[in-house]
Image (cartoon, rainbow, N blue to C red):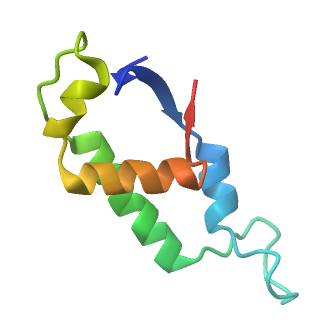
Amino acid sequence: MLNVLGENYFVDFDEIENYIDMGNIDNVSLSGESEMRVNIIKFELIKMMLEVVLSEDSDMDDKLGLKSSNNISVPFKLAFNSLLNKKLINHY
């Protein structure tokens, strides 16, 4: 596990699947039972936020803890907090 801001977090793939699924909105009969309807706007936003979080490259001193979080970029903070708020990233 990687330590982020002094805590261990993980990406909850099941929660992401539930979050972008639109299967319960309309009762439209589908041609196959294995099809999944996806909200494309949510999908693209989640994809972009995960790319930002996973590609953040900053040198942080683990001993400083939250004091070193000032060096983190604004896109990372916004993406991480948004995913955490929607429970798509969870504390381990």
> Residue 17, located in which quarter of the rendered image?
bottom right
In the image, is residue 4 above or below residue 22?
A: above
> Residue 20, located in which quarter of the rendered image?
bottom right
In the image, is residue 90 above or below residue 18?
A: above
| Residue drawn at point x = 43 percent, y = 17 percent | 1
| Residue drawn at point x = 13 percent, y = 33 percent | 58
In the image, is residue 65 above or below residue 39?
A: above
Q: Nearer the viewer, residue 23 or 90?
A: 90
| Residue drawn at point x = 59 percent, y = 44 percent | 13
Q: Nearer the viewer, residue 16 or 89?
A: 89
Residue lying at the far front in this picture: please name it.
67
- Position of the C terminus, as image quadrant, is top right
Side of 11 relative to 63 (left or right): right
> Residue 23, located in which quarter of the rendered image?
bottom right
| Residue drawn at point x = 68 percent, y = 68 percent | 21
The image shows residue 47 at horizontal and vertical percentages of: 40, 60
The image shows residue 48 at horizontal and vertical percentages of: 33, 61
The image shows residue 18 at horizontal and vertical percentages of: 70, 58
